[in-house]
Amino acid sequence: MPKTRLEAFSDGVLAIIITIMVLEMKVPHDPTLDALRALSPVFLSYILSFVYVGIYWNNHHHMLHTVHRVSGAILWANLHLLFWLSLFPFATGWMGENHFAPLPTMLYGAVLLMAAMAYLILQRCIIAAEGDQTALKQAVGNDWKGKMSLLAYLAGIGVSLIWPWLAQALYVAVALMWLIPDRRIERAQHHPQA
């Protein structure tokens, strides 16, 4: 399979995920600021999830630029990632509708954790198919950002039942860490190591 089909399918799924998330926000029936204020937890959840989907889309795009051939393992790993990302609308909606309550906050963190692990698996499958000397392998190196993200998600899940606000702060911190575009893959492709 050419990688363009994989990219197109993934882009379509991510676009649908964002569409579902925005459709989950119900329009208030009252034309008042109080009605909008009541929706603020839903809107804040949407913003956070929109940023996360954007981060995944951006990094997925850069990572797939390193792929020369798509193996079966890459296809299944990509579907695994898309599965976890497809749960964002549910986790986002539940957390926002329940005003960042402990259990929805914990589930949201679990979905973030599983999506991050699925991304890591996809990354490993690409490296296995392309070889250790590829731009992707050189770019990710020790992948401190990926490891820090996993630790932050685990910590967020761990504290969510006691301090959901701290869990939310950890989830936001990870998003902010990744919001700055990761140029490692671009640099590795343009300046390969000998």
Image: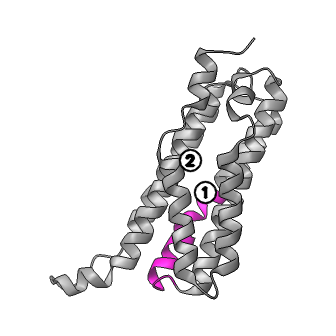
Q: Is residue 80 magenta?
A: no
Which color scheme is applied? one colour
Q: Position of residue 106 (x, y in %)?
A: 64, 78
Q: Amino acid at mark 2?
A: Tyr
Q: Magenta segment, which residues?
A: 84-100
Instruction: Please give left or right for residue 114 compared with residue 10 in the image.
Output: right
Q: Residue 114 location, x and y as percent?
A: 71, 61
Q: CA distance from mark 1 to mark 2?
A: 9 Å
In the image, 21 versus 64, the foreground residue is: 64
Most extreme residue toward the left is 31
- Which amino acid, by three-letter code, is at mark 1? Leu
Q: For the C terminus, which image quadrant?
A: top right
Dominant SS type (magenta): helix
Residue at horizontal 64%, vertical 86%?
A: 161
- Taking the magenta stretch, the answer to whether it contains residue 90 is yes
- Give yes or no for contact between labels 1 and 2 (Cβ–Cβ under 8 Å): yes
Residue in front for this viewpoint, 169 or 128: 169
Q: Quadrant of residue 125?
A: top right
Does residue 42 lie above or below 58 as drawn? Answer: below
Q: Element under label 2? A: helix
Q: Residue at x 51, y 80 (%)?
A: 165
- Above/below status of 190 relative to 53: above
Disc 1 target residue: 85
Circle on res. 56: 2
Question: Closer to us: mark 1 or mark 2?
Answer: 2
